[in-house]
Image (cartoon, coloured by chain):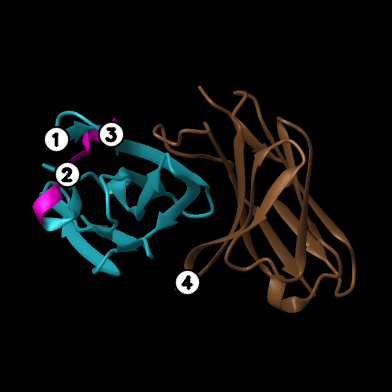
């Protein structure tokens, strides 16, 4: 079974802090994704990466950056956390051809106070 | 542009009753189609997928879905719902020509005893 793990299930940070969310997958998937999920808005794509050191902006990249130094690890960075970034963050991975779908981590519930 | 529509935001069914969750997509070619389930506070779990072949696909937990090209639909069904099926269900579209996946806004399923 594919396993996607996220570094924290719950995280509380203060406004202005730099926040790192880590995601690791163990199935050698080329693609990795970061979404945020908010009530009534569904899943919104922040960034995705199709290869090491490659990244593309999703639908809501503002206020976020990403890093993919190794194939199995994809990090989401909030440079200066704000209260409107309080959300559930979901990481996912997939094979390059996508036909098998995405595999999701358990999510990180981030609260910015 | 690709899009996925789940017209029902909430559905309530009685335990033991049949279930159908609707999903319509907009895409020019045959897409890859997926259904995911999300229990409260958890990540998304893949229920089933379609990318070619038989248009009726079987998934985990007794779910099935049927791809109807003429209706651009991929509805999820279960003949007899269990209380443990209460969750939020997401339909998604992907394709080998692009790395993104497109998600519907989700349908929350409530199961009455």
Which mark's residue is nearer the viewer, 4 or 3?
Answer: 4
Which mark's residue is nearer the viewer, 2 or 4?
Answer: 2
**Residue tagged 1:** B56
The chain drawn in cyan is B
Badge 2 and badge 1 both on one subunit: yes
Q: Are marks 3 and 1 in contact (CB under 8 Å)?
A: no
Q: Residue B21: which disc? A: none
Q: Secondary structure at mark 1?
A: strand
Counting residues from the N terminus, which is met first, the one under dot 2 or under dot 3?
A: 3
The part of the chain drawn in magenta is B59-70
At a point 31% along the width and 36% down the height, the residue shown is B48
Badge 4 and badge 3 both on one subunit: no
Q: Residue B61: which disc? A: 3
Chain at numbered mark 1: B
At a point 71% along the width and 30% down the height, the residue shown is A72
- Could you tell me residue B17's position as x and y percent? 10, 50
Q: Colour of chain A?
A: brown
Q: Is-magenta flag for residue B60?
A: yes
Q: Residue B67: which disc? A: 2
Q: Are marks 4 and 1 in contact (CB under 8 Å)?
A: no
Which mark's residue is nearer the viewer, 4 or 1?
Answer: 1
- Could you tell me residue A67's position as x and y percent? 79, 47
> Could you classify mark 1 by the number of other residues whose Cα lies within 10 Å: few (under 14), some (14-19), or many (20 or more)?
few
Q: Residue A41: which disc? A: 4
Chain at numbered mark 2: B
Distance, label 2 to label 1, CA atoms, is 6 Å
Q: Secondary structure at mark 2?
A: strand
Left or right: residue B47 compared with residue A101: left
């Amino acid at each position: 079974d594919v396993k996607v793990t996220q570094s924290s299930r719950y995280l509380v940070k203060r406004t202005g802090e730099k926040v790192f969310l880590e995601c690791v997958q163990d199935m050698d998937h080329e693609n990795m994704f970061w979404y945020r999920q908010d009530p009534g808005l569904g899943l919104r794509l922040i960034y995705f990466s199709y290869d090491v050191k490659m990244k593309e902006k999703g639908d809501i990249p503002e206020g976020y950056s990403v890093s993919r130094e190794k194939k199995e690890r994809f990090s989401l960075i909030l440079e200066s956390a704000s209260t409107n970034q309080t959300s559930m963050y979901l990481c996912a991975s997939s094979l390059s051809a996508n036909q098998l779908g995405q595999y999701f981590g358990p999510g990180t519930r981030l609260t910015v106070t | 542009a690709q899009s996925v529509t789940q017209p029902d935001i909430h559905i309530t069914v009685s335990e033991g009753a049949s279930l159908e969750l609707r999903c319509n997509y907009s895409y020019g070619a045959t897409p890859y189609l997926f259904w995911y389930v999300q229990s409260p506070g958890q990540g998304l779990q893949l229920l089933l997928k379609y990318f070619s072949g038989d248009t009726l696909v079987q998934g985990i937990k007794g779910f099935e879905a049927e791809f109807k090209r003429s209706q651009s639909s991929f509805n999820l069904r279960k003949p007899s719902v269990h209380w443990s099926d209460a969750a939020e269900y997401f339909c998604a579209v992907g394709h080998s020509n692009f790395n993104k996946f497109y998600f519907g806004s989700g349908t929350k399923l409530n199961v009455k005893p």
